[in-house]
């Protein structure tokens, strides 16, 4: 007795499905990687938006004051946190001096350039601003010397021959541990004119 075997030939749909299963199997890992990368990007953007929304923003408020009466000229500004969380470890490098018309500030706080360094532990949002006051000085042979507000100096400022410049850089850390900076430049006297270097110095970090 003979027993034969019969093999049914696969249909076209069965073959097509097998081919697509193989293709899908190859594509699935790629799709999974893309999904993970997309989720990571969304997480990063959300986290970055949180940092920007909740971070501290240190700013210089109001108009500086340069009284020309007394034994020296104090240069004063107010520094405040206009963000939503405290600004910590605040360092301020600042300098104020009298320059002749046409002179430009150096904006140099390196060794050999007299300036003031002030430390403020913490400034809280919506809290009282930190008042910074430093004397207006000139470079001397050994060190900076306080400028005396004499009648001649007042006349030179009024006539547009001299001006007072006051500039500085504030560095601080937010509650997320990120470092930031704010720089400022201002002054007194028409001799400043359109001092582009001073205007450009007013800036903030891009992070």
Image (cartoon, rainbow, N blue to C red):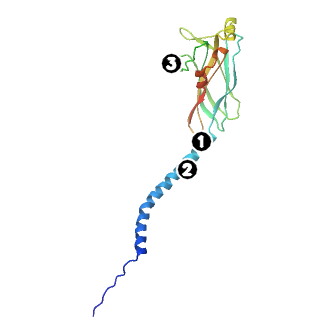
Report, in whole angstroms, how far the alpha carbon at label 3 lies from the one at label 2. Answer: 45 Å
Name the front one of labels 3 and 1: 1
Q: Helix, strand, or loop for circle 1?
A: helix
Taking depth in this image into account, of 162 and 114 the one nearest to the observer is 162
**Residue that label 1 marks:** 51
List the residue tagged with mark 2. Answer: 42
Pair 2/1: label in front: 2
Q: Which residue is mark 3?
A: 111
Give yes or no for contact between labels 3 and 1 (Cβ–Cβ under 8 Å). Answer: no
Q: Secondary structure at mark 3?
A: loop
Task: Give whichever of 78, 8 is nearer the camera.
Answer: 8
Q: Please report the residue visible at 61 percent of the width from the left and 33 percent of the height from the top.
A: 88
Q: Are marks 3 and 2 in contact (CB under 8 Å)?
A: no
- The quadrant the N terminus occupies is bottom left
First reached walking from the N terminus: tag 3 or tag 2: 2
Marks 2,1: beta carbons within 8 A: no
Q: Earlier in the sequence, mark 2 or mark 1?
A: 2
Per the model, the C-alpha gap separating discs 3 and 1 is: 34 Å
Q: Residues within 10 Å of mark 3 (few under 14, many from 20)?
A: few
Secondary structure of the residue carrying numbered label 2: helix
Q: Nearer the viewer, mark 3 or mark 2?
A: 2
**Up-down relation of residue 130 to residue 144 (above or below):** below
Q: Which residue is most to the front?
A: 12
Q: CA distance from mark 2 to mark 1?
A: 14 Å
The residue located at (67%, 20%) in the rendering is 76
Residue 6's place in the image compared with 192, above or below, is below
Instruction: Please identify the quarter of the rendering in which residue 11 is found.
Output: bottom left
Instruction: Give the answer, above or below, for where 47 lies relative to 60.
Output: below
| Residue 165 in view in this figure | yes
């Amino acid at each position: 007795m003979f027993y034969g075997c019969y093999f049914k030939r696969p249909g076209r749909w069965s073959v097509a499905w097998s081919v697509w299963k193989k293709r899908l199997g190859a594509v699935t890992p790629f799709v999974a990687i893309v999904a993970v990368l997309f989720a990571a990007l969304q997480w990063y953007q959300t986290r970055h938006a949180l940092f920007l929304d909740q971070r501290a923003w240190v700013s210089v408020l109001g108009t500086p004051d340069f009284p020309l009466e007394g034994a020296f000229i104090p240069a004063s500004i107010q520094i405040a946190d206009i963000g939503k969380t405290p600004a910590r470890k605040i360092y301020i490098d600042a300098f104020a001096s009298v320059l002749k018309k046409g002179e430009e500030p150096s904006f140099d706080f390196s060794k050999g350039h007299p300036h003031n360094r002030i430390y403020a532990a913490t400034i809280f949002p919506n809290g009282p601003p930190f008042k910074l006051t430093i004397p207006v000085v000139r470079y001397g042979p050994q060190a900076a010397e306080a400028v005396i507000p004499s009648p001649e100096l007042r006349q030179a400022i009024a006539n547009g021959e001299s001006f007072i410049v006051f500039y500085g850089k504030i560095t601080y850390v937010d509650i997320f541990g990120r470092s930031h900076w704010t720089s400022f430049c201002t002054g007194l006297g028409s001799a400043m004119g359109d001092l582009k270097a001073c205007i450009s110095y007013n800036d903030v970090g891009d992070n």
